[in-house]
Amino acid sequence: MQDSSSTPQVTGAGVAESPALPRPGGEPMLELVEITKRFPGVLANDAISLRVDRGEILGLLGENGAGKSTLMNIVYGMQAPDSGEIRIGGEPVTIRSPQDAVALRVGMVHQHFMLVPDMTVAENVVLEPSRGPGRARLEEVGRELEEIGRRFELYVSPTAMVEDLSTGERQRVEILKVLYRDADILILDEPTSALTPQEWTEFAGFLRRMAEAGKAVIFITHKLDELFDLVDRCVVLRDGRVVDTVAIGDTDKRSLAKTMVGREVTLRAERPILAPGRPVLDVKGLRLGSGRHHEVDGISFEIREHEVFGIAGVSGNGQDELVEALVGLAQPTAGEISIDGEPLVQHAPRAFTAGGGALIPENRHADGVATELSLLDNLILKELDSSRFSRHGVLALDAAREHAEELVAAYDIRGPGVDAPIGQLSGGNQQKAVLARELSRDPRFVIAFQPTLGLDVGAMETVYRRLNERKSSGSAVLLVSYELDEILSMADRFAVMVDGRFLSVIAAADADTEVIGMLMGGEEAA
């Protein structure tokens, strides 16, 4: 096991006696040999071996909780393995911290941006461990960032405030932080979960240029389309083990999905066709904002029983504000919201929940879970005053535990147990916990905002099945998604939202992807 000092060490060349590794045929940049990592109740990495070569983009695929992020956190020095060996350039090394990783020219871009919003791009770059001693002058940093941006077609103004940047531009800043430190090995953990299709195209081109420049790239994603568009080989993890390593040209999406999950999976949701019932949600003339700019600008729509109503569009067109108004986090300046015919006047999130509303939020970390509380606590968080779990103000722990265990089994939530902090679970398993908590309360109205963001295909299948179960049970479902395929496969009707307005409401049977794309781009005449 690695110790905790701060200097990277080369411990000798002895590679001949180590286990055999896949041989893609190039110069090895990074090799992992029999890496094992345990947490209480969980074997996260079980003797994992893999290799990535200079100029190669290696895909790392696996279900939520398969051990991908843990493995890469070990490479980046954020966690120490219990056993195994890391080699860089053929030489065994010991990496005890991110500073060690940077010194060994390893860089990592995490799933969630690690940026300070009220600082400039250059200031964010020099916050990280630097390549040399002393405090860098921001002017020099800015000039070097501009040169890196020109070289790799990745320009962002060094003086721009991060809070003013788009999601795609913030992603560029994360990459610039890595390149500024001359990283030769780039680890990207779910880097595209918040990018638009256009931003993904730009990002993929950048990664190809990295490989052409001789970098080695490890690309973690749940999106099979991205893998087939980008990587050379793919390592598949399941339950903390490597189950296959394949050349991407020798497989297909269905086979790769089956290898990852261990069973056949449906890559596209099946939409049950049901006769809609009476209106559950009724929104009339909803307006949010003031002056010349309205985040929500006079929207009217209704969602009925047995119906999924979708909202399609590019991020930043008022979707967040609309959801905030519906759940009571923001008060509209005009209009009316009714649930089951009862107007919500100056309502709050508690009233939304009490009225039969359920929310699967876009940002599960900030809005969906309390990471320091246990999985059990999170699963009953919205029913603490229910007679099922509270007697005279005292938690009925046995009943709560039984309920939590039932939800863990029903929703396949994988982790150390219901008493462990939910922050120890993978992001996908946290999302399944949110889904279990919200849908198990038999809600009348469900808001699902980017419900499959960052999920593997098996977990996505679970989300779609559970939402369709609520639809079949008579709930009304609002699905807000930036994935057009998700809208088209799940929604009975959907609106295209641009600049706070619904440009059109379209029945699924009448959907034309070319027209929808034009509408999403603001071409109202389409």
Image (cartoon, rainbow, N blue to C red):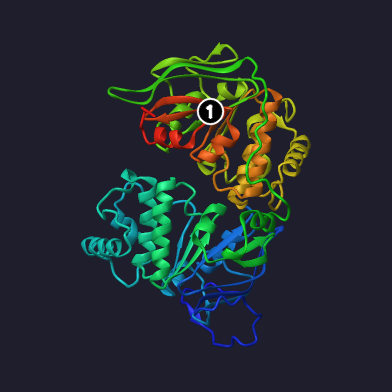
Residue 116 visible in the snapshot = no
Judged from the image, the secondary structure of the residue bearing numbered disc 1 is: helix
Q: Picture quarter containing residue 137?
A: bottom left
Q: Residue at x 36, y 45 (%)?
A: 166
19 lies above or below 463: below
Q: Which residue is mark 1?
A: 510
Q: Amino acid at mark 1?
A: Asp
Q: Residue furthest left?
A: 139
10 Å crowding of disc 1: few (<14), some (14-19), many (20+): few
- Indicate the position of residue 460 as horizontal and vertical percent values: 63, 44
Residue 71 visible in the snapshot = yes
- Indicate the position of residue 450 as horizontal and vertical percent values: 53, 39
Q: Quadrant of the C terminus?
A: top left
- Indicate the position of residue 161 as horizontal and vertical percent values: 29, 48
Q: Residue at x 33, y 44 (%)?
A: 163
- Indicate the position of residue 1 as horizontal and vertical percent values: 62, 74
Image-based side of 393 in relation to 96, left or right: right
